Amino acid sequence: MKENIYNLSFSELKSFFIGLEEKTFRADQLWNWLYVKGINEFSGLNNISKNIINKINDKYYLSELKVSKTLLSKDGTRKWLFELEDGKEIETVYIPDKNRGTICVSSQVGCSLACSFCHTGTMKFSRNLRTSEILGQVIYVKNFLKDWNKNSDKKKITNIVFMGMGEPLLNYDNVIKSINVLTDEKGLAFSKRKVTLSTSGVVPRILDFKEDSDVNLAVSFHAAFDEVRNILVPINKKWSIDHLLEVLKEYSKKKKHKRITFEYVMLEGINDSINDAKELVKLIKPFKAKINLIPFNPWPGSNYNASSPNQVNIFKKFILEEGKLLATVRLPRGDDVLAACGQLKSF
Ligand code: SF4
């Protein structure tokens, strides 16, 4: 059976050509076609002989993800529902901004972690995405936006966040492989400073991640007390706040230059009091960190209410002024089409 070529790392592609007894620069040529020029069929490879193209074709195929639905928010955010080869569905979001464009990619079909504020968490976990399905989301959006411009100042997609469906660190190998392709300077060349992986706190994998990758780390923190975090982010029952912070200290020791983003969804009466803010500051203080406050984006059937804008401001002010920590409030984007944070769930 043929394999999707987007599943291959550069070294695997090189081995393929070695196996054919071809020169390894063929791998560089094909990599360039795939990830710099953005071809969508092998027949367009005009610097590679017909004979070699046939051999590539015998083993691999090249295809775009299939869209089953697309929604456009009034703020320009666009959400796609993709149907995968086995009929499973995932969502991808593109968020355009003044000087940048961000793709929020999914890493799993569904999610096993059931965070209680998250729409995806109400779906059952189905399977991990393959590397080709993770990269396929970015490639689809690049094709859609005609974003294969070599001039990096003109790129419409500048940032990638692993914050869509799924827990990326539970699909570790494929996510790390995808990140390596995304940030490969001879290919898609996304800056490592502009790629962010967000985890709910898969403690052992954070230790691996600090060795294996140099992209940014965000943590879905959401509560400063275990009793509350156990409910909002149930993986906390396995790896408590103390345990999580301990490995984050290890991470910070290794990645001294990196700032960890702590994501904190603001839920009325649940985690938005000054007492919560005080404890949060105490916990985060030892880190080079930023706290990203996320106004809750409701979804059908959700059990929580968003904190009022006033309460979000009071909370933020406390962190900034009393805590002397960096804090920002994330602007809800695409919430009218359920494309905002925590709202993704196969339409
Ligand atoms: S927040 Fe992330 S880890 Fe938690 S249920 Fe949603 S997708 Fe899964």
Image (cartoon, rainbow, N blue to C red):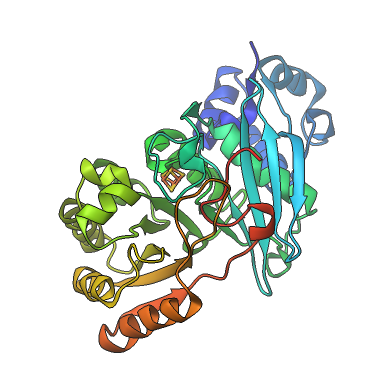
Q: Position of residue 70 (x, y in %)?
A: 76, 45
The correct choice, above or below, for 196 with respect to 168 in the image is: below
Tell me the residue at 26%/83% (across/down): 323
Tell me, yes or no, if residue 33 can be seen here.
Answer: yes
Residue lying farthest to the top in this orientation: 1
Q: Quadrant of the C terminus?
A: top right
Q: Quadrant of the N terminus?
A: top right
Which one is in front, 177 or 46? 177
The correct choice, above or below, for 75 with respect to 34 in the image is: below
Tell me the residue at 16%/51% (across/down): 243
Q: Position of residue 256 (x, y in %)?
A: 27, 67
Q: Ligand 1 sits in which quadrant?
A: top left
The correct choice, above or below, for 279 with respect to 143 in the image is: below
Image-based side of 10 in relation to 203, left or right: right
Which one is in front, 7 or 244? 244
Tell me, yes or no, if residue 32 can be seen here.
Answer: no
Tell me the residue at 29%/42% (across/down): 235
Q: Position of residue 43 (x, y in %)?
A: 83, 28
